[in-house]
Amino acid sequence: MTRRLLPLALLCLLCQSGCLVVDFTEGQTVAVDNLAKIVPGTTTKQQILDWFGAPQGIADAQFLENYLINQELAPGPVVNMPYADVLVFRFTHGKGRGIIAIVWNWFELHIASDTLIVFFDADDRVLYYGFRKGTDDLPR
Amino acid sequence: MTFLARAFALVACLGLSTGCILYRSYIGNELPPAADGGIVLGKTTKSDVLRDLGPPDRLVRQYDGDVFVYEYIRRNESTLQLEEPVFTHYTVFEYTRVTEKNDRMVVFFDRGGVVAGVGFRRGTEQLGPL
């Protein structure tokens, strides 16, 4: 009986394994279709707000970003203080996965962002802007 | 030693959990191989940098002009742990090694929005496999 129980006990120990999948997002997706409408020197700040919504750091909740910064997992917000001549729109996506076994555990976390930054002149017209779709580089 | 005693010893040894934990994190977007290659001091503008490299991960404002910071952070954490798993969770031994490296580029602009300085260091290449 004992000889039969031993493999069963070992099997039970080995079965105490699992996998972990984490997927999280924060912020509003950047309306990529509206990027082509931006014309430096012509587009106004109000148009940018109409097209892309509330900018980061002024109205968006930043729970996740604050948590990641506290855990030293993110470099921090693009701008620490709200500036009248800069608006930032950011969508953050994180993907994590892991294997939990008895003697070997492996975890991997990827975090990337789509970021749009727009600079304005003294008349609140777009001076220049930059966009990067970083979430495309996340692993599938 | 009876078979039962040997079996008990084996299960006890397995029960004294020895764990190896590997944790890898990749934060941000990888910088292109020669991120600073196209930047010419006194000539390249803020608009050029935004077009070629996209928005910075951080914008710092100085009296003399803006600073763009681009950063890609990788962290490798490896832990070997030996603990009593059932009753006390007493850790007999634990070894942890954390290595964090980053690719970081800093671009300084003058008040007119022209590049005044650039610094680039690719640190993630120094990261070992474990």
Image (spheres, coloured by chain):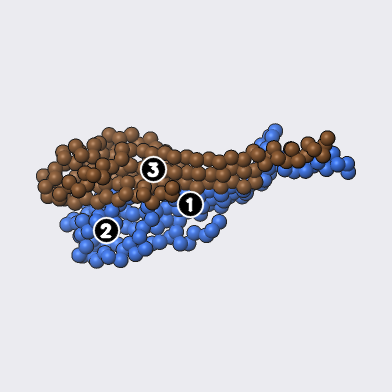
Chain colours: A brown, B blue
Residue for point 30% across, 35% down = A60
Residue for point 88% across, 41% down = B2
Mark 1: which amino acid? Arg
Identify which residue, A13 or B23, lies in the foreground.
Answer: A13
Determine which of the numbered discs, if any, sits on residue B52 in the image. Answer: 2
**Quadrant in the picture for residue B42:** bottom left
Mark 3: which amino acid? His
Q: What x and y, as percent, mark residue A52?
A: 23, 39
Whether residues under marks 3 and 1 lie with C-beta atoms below 8 angstroms apart, the answer is: no
In the image, B99: left or right of A14?
left
Q: CA distance from mark 3 to mark 1?
A: 18 Å
Using the image, determine if residue A59 lies above or below residue B111.
above
Callout 2: chain: B
Using the image, determine if residue B54 lies above or below residue A48.
below
The residue singled out by tag 3 in the image is: A93
Callout 3: chain: A
Q: CA distance from mark 3 to mark 2?
A: 23 Å
Residue for point 28% across, 53% down = B54
Determine which of the numbered discs, if any, sits on residue B75 in the image. Answer: 1
